[in-house]
Image (spheres, helix red, strand yellow):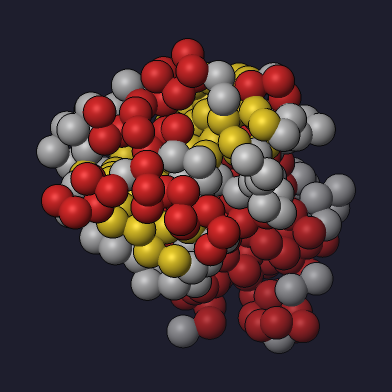
Amino acid sequence: MKAPKDQHFLIDTDAVDFIADSIPVEGRNVLEIGPGGGVLTAALLERGANVRAVELDGTLLPNLERRFKDELSTGQLTITRGDASRVPLPEFDLVIANLPYSISSKITFRLLETGFEAAVLMYQWEFAKRMVAPPGDGEYGRLSVMVQTYADVELILELPPKAFNPPPEVDSAVVKILPHEPPIKILNREAHEILVRELFSHRRKTIQNGLKGMKSIYGEEIMASLINGLPKELLGKRPEMLSVTEFIELANLLANHIQ
């Protein structure tokens, strides 16, 4: 079966079983994004999951409908046609999916906004490394901070290109995501998102210079007032040295200035 666009079908049966067994699914509504040929779908159904699949490529639907005729008739499986980063999603408790890599970021943040109990998702290896990177690591950046603000993330499996058909040009990784509330309350989520984005867009700059660069967004007076109230030690750091909590604390100070 030919894979559409950037979709690579998982053919390593041990990996399929590992992913399907990574969290208990019996009797749960499991969102699967991009079921493709249905290999992971079948494994989830065998374990008693109620699979809520979302598939963009209409050419794959006839095969899925034939293969899972019985499960579709009983409602154990439903299939929604469309782009999972945009279409209304069916109700779900868990997410288990081999994501199309081109929508990794979009769908991850959409899922975190929607809410779920746990997710096990396939990503490109480099993307997964950035998700789990700690402060001070060269891979630590905007993605790391934004995901770790709202969830615990753990890299649980690395897979080579030969585990897929067709094989991608890069290694892949499976990440387990367990949502949680931010470590401290975020006063203004938009301000927090903008702060993280802007500071990491100039990651070689110090926090002080990064904040100065935000005057085009919040005005010179507000940014000068914020900077003047911050300790020199913090102002001299670079973004990759700040923890998730420190980013929230800085964003909350910004929020107080823009009220």
Residue for point 42% across, 33% down: 40
Quadrant of the rendering where the N terminus is positioned? top right
Residue 38 x %, y %? 44, 39
**110 lies above or below 170:** below
Q: Answer with the quarter of the image where residue 195 lies.
A: bottom right
Residue 90 at what x, y percent from top left? 29, 63
Q: Residue furthest right?
A: 204
Q: Position of residue 66 (x, y in %)?
A: 37, 48
Point 61% across, 49% down: residue: 100
Q: Is residue 104 above or below residue 27?
A: below
Q: Going 78% across and 59% down the picture, which residue do you hit?
A: 201
In the image, 203 versus 238, the foreground residue is 203
Looking at the picture, tell me which residue is in the foreground, 69 or 77.
69
| Residue at image location 74% in from the left, 30% down from the top | 167
Residue 39, position in %: x, y? 45, 33
Q: Is residue 49 left or right of residue 166?
A: left
